[in-house]
Amino acid sequence: MNRYLFLVLFFLSSNAMASDLWGPNGLIFSPGVIFGQFESQDSSTATPNSLSLSFAKPFTHWFSLRLDYTNGVSGGESSFEGENFKAEVDRIWSGFAKFNYGSEWSQYYLLAGVSQADFFAGQKNEPTYEYTQISPSFGVGASMKIEKKTMMALEYVSYMTGGMGGDVNFSAFGVRFEQAF
């Protein structure tokens, strides 16, 4: 699976192929930081933070596909089964359809897709509770141009919705820098 993902990203990132064959901007790479909120039926709210990398392929000025990878960097204190633990995001893979509206200088966007997330809670870096969930995801955001091919984006994404077959809710505010190639 990882081999196929690497081949697809390599093929899409080729500047000559991307700009000539697939639309207006080639590929967009956007690193970011997300500030999350984790809730489950067994624990209180925790606030894990993560780093996020995103690749998007615009097909038109109003539609693109986006692939995100998020990796936890710090966890929030939570109560789980009567004890205090540090809850963290292990990793999240997400695929989104991104719908843009706006001008060259500022845009608003909607995200709709699916995410697979791995979470854990533990004491002293030893996971005692691990959880994996696949869930529909959605989000909204706004971005503003800060340089010729660079935009800064603020977004809110609901990665996991516990009411749809899982028991974990995870949503996050994010700050991203979008660099077009």
Image (cartoon, rainbow, N blue to C red):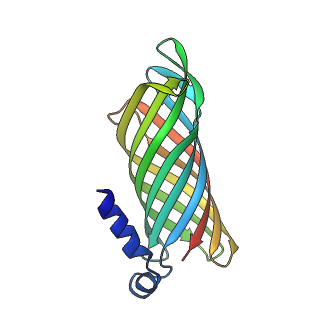
- Of residue 139 and residue 53, the one placed in the foreground of this image is 53
Q: Is residue 76 visible?
A: yes
Given residues 59 and 93, the one toward you in this image is: 93
Residue most toward the top? 82
Q: Where is residue 9 in the image (x, y as percent from the top left)?
A: 39, 68
Image location of residue 16, percent across then percent down = 44, 86
Label count reads 0
The quadrant the N terminus occupies is bottom left
Report if residue 163 is visible in the image.
Answer: no
Quarter containing the C terminus: bottom right
Q: In which image quadrant can residue 153 be found?
A: bottom right
Residue at image position (57%, 36%) is 48
Residue 126 versus residue 154: which sits nearer the camera? 126
| Relative image position of residue 162 (x, y in whole percent) | 40, 33
Q: Is residue 29 left or right of residue 7?
A: right
Q: Tell me what residue is drawn at x 57 percent, y 49 percent.
A: 51
Residue at horizontal 53 percent and vertical 13 percent from the top: 83
Residue 38 sits above or below residue 25 on the image: above
**In-image side of 64 versus 4 (left or right):** right
Q: Which of 22 and 111 is in front in this view?
A: 22
141 versus 167 height, above or below: below
Residue shown at the point (46%, 63%) measured from the top left? 98
Q: Where is residue 77, by image quadrant?
A: top right
Q: In which quarter of the image is residue 164?
A: top left
Residue 151 percent coordinates (x, y): 64, 68
